[in-house]
Amino acid sequence: MPLKAITTISIVGLLCIAAYALFQLLIDTNPPAPKKELLVYCGITMIHPMSEIASIIEQREDVKISFIKGGSGNLLNSIKFNRIGDLYLPGSESYIEQSKAEGLVTRTAHVGFNKAAMMVREGNPKSIQPGLDALNNPDLYVVIGDPDSGSIGKETKKILSAAGIFDQVMKNAKELTTDSKRLVEVLKKGEADLVINWYATSTWKENASDIEAISIDDKYAVKKQLILGLLTFSKYPDIANKIMDYAASAEGQRIFDRYGLYKID
């Protein structure tokens, strides 16, 4: 091959390499914009349906949705302290009312229902009978939620106070715990005989074979509305509103119902 042709090919090759290097440099210095990321504060009992809804919205809107989960009261304290995030879903409407009064929540949407129940290990090995008086039995290892940390504790106090036995049960209880997750754990591990927890937790597939619910009389335990709130300092209120709209839609109701959080007797 003539020297001139070889030289030409070499120059063209070098130019191609230089162009490719420049292209890579441009890519490296201009990375794609990061996805919008929303933050949801969610009570533990509602994390399953909200995670499912979040996955749907993430696909539709090309965003990322992260969760902070815990007891509703503890979550509210985090919101007050951090003043960041987009949505708040506690286990009791009273926390939303408090949030609105303190200027933390603007728009709200009803997404489901919650109801408390007594719970024992599957098969009820201690033959515990219906009725709140069982919580006063000193022979039973009773665990209840702390009224100051989560929605189930707050609801438990209302139920027991209405029945006139709150102080007695507090004295008989062997442990106060922060949230519904721990109430599930103590039963599944055989550490407790009797708890009060949100009914929905007994229906989940990971718990259904280990936990049995005992209904509490409707005059003490009533259905509680689950209210999703838009935080006033949301960075992406347009997307947050889409999450709320979907959660409150017929499709969203079906998702909540699959986790025992809509059609409750």
Image: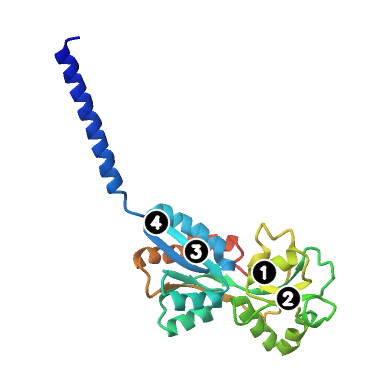
Comes first in the chain, label 3 or label 2: 3
Q: Nearer the viewer, residue 260 or 178?
A: 178
The circle drawn on residue 67 is 3
Instruction: Give the mark nearest the N terminus, 2 or 1.
Output: 2
Quarter of the picture holding the N terminus:
top left
Label located before the other in sequence (1 or 4) = 4
Residue matched to label 2: 143
Q: Are marks 4 and 3 in contact (CB under 8 Å)?
A: no
Q: Disc 4 versus disc 3: distance between alpha carbons?
A: 13 Å
Look at the image and tell me whether residue 265 can be seen: no
Residue at 41 percent across and 75 percent down: it is: 83
Q: Secondary structure at mark 3?
A: strand
Percent position of residue 81, x then y: 45, 77
Q: Work out whether 164 lies above or below 141.
A: below
The disc placed on residue 182 is 1
Q: Are marks 2 and 1 in contact (CB under 8 Å)?
A: yes
Identify which amino acid the numbered label 4 is placed on: Val
Q: Return the residue at label 4.
A: 63
Residue at image location 75% in from the left, 80% down from the top: 173
Q: Amino acid at mark 2?
A: Val
Residue 48 sits above or below residue 214 on the image: above
